[in-house]
Amino acid sequence: MESIDKIKGIYEKKAAESDKTEVSNAVIRRLPRYHRYLGELIKEGRLRISSAELSKIMGVTASQIRQDFNCFGGFGQQGYGYNVKYLHAKIGELLGMAEGYRAVIVGLGNLGKALATTHMFERRGVEVVALFDVKPELVGTDYNGFHVYHTDKLFDFCRENNIHIGVLTVPKESAEKVAMTLSEAGVKGLWNFANMELTVKDSNVIVQNVHLGDSLMTLCFGVKSGKEKGIFDDQI
């Protein structure tokens, strides 16, 4: 069987030869799913997989899978398929899991507290370093091992601690002000749960607006319409 070093060499050659084309949002949205499914395959002891096999698992056509990976130079070779561990690692690199991103959570309501207690961040290479709120009963305390600062310290903290990502779980009336503070402090990614379409003036700042209610309503539509498909989301 081909060694991991040889597989790596083949990928690097393809990546160097490929054109630097813009990757669509649809492809980007599928990358975390590829990473998640490949992680499960690693746990099962799988060493390699074909696009046809991966297609059956994910509900994405084999052709689409090959097209997605070709956006980054391709990761497999004809007659072999994909080395599962290597593909998992490379997609993790594309997703920035090894970049050492640091995050703060602003807003300690029920959702903010839930996010502060999850292992989701560390499992994806993001380190939460502090929490922020305005409530006197929370400011100055520790929650789940994180110190809670007043939001008037947000700008200075982010500047001094090289924060890359801001997680907003604040009321929507406060979201724009918080987002402006974060972007002016040099934060480059905003994960917005404030139930509004948030935009920022700085074109270098990426905003991901998350609407949990929209996801629920999409599910309700599927139930009402009797949709037969087992997977019903916007990532396919």
Image (cartoon, helix red, strand yellow):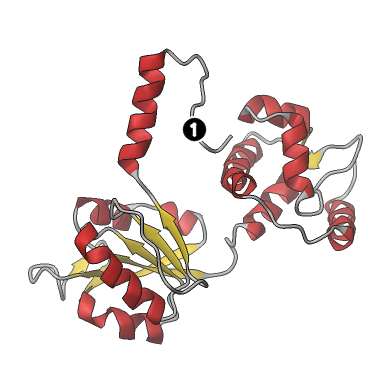
Judge left or right: residue 213 versus residue 48.
Answer: left
Foreground residue, 114 or 68?
68
Residue drawn at (25%, 51%), measured in percent from left and top? 111
Where residue 13 sits in the image (x, y, percent)? 90, 59
- The answer to whether residue 47 of the structure is visible from this angle is no
Indicate the quadrant where residue 78 lies.
top right
**Which corner quadrant of the image does residue 161 belong to?**
bottom left
Q: Is residue 176 above or below residue 232?
A: below
Q: Image quarter for residue 165?
A: bottom left
**Residue sitting nearer the eye, 14 or 102:** 14
Instruction: Please tell me how many numbered marks the rendered image carries.
Output: 1
Residues packed near mark 1 inside 10 Å, few (<14), some (14 to 19) or many (20 plus): few
Along the line of sight, which residue is nearer the eye, 48 or 45? Answer: 48
Which residue is tagged 1? Answer: 233
On screen, residue 124 versus residue 49, left or right, reads: left
Query: Residue 98, image x and y in percent?
Result: 60, 65
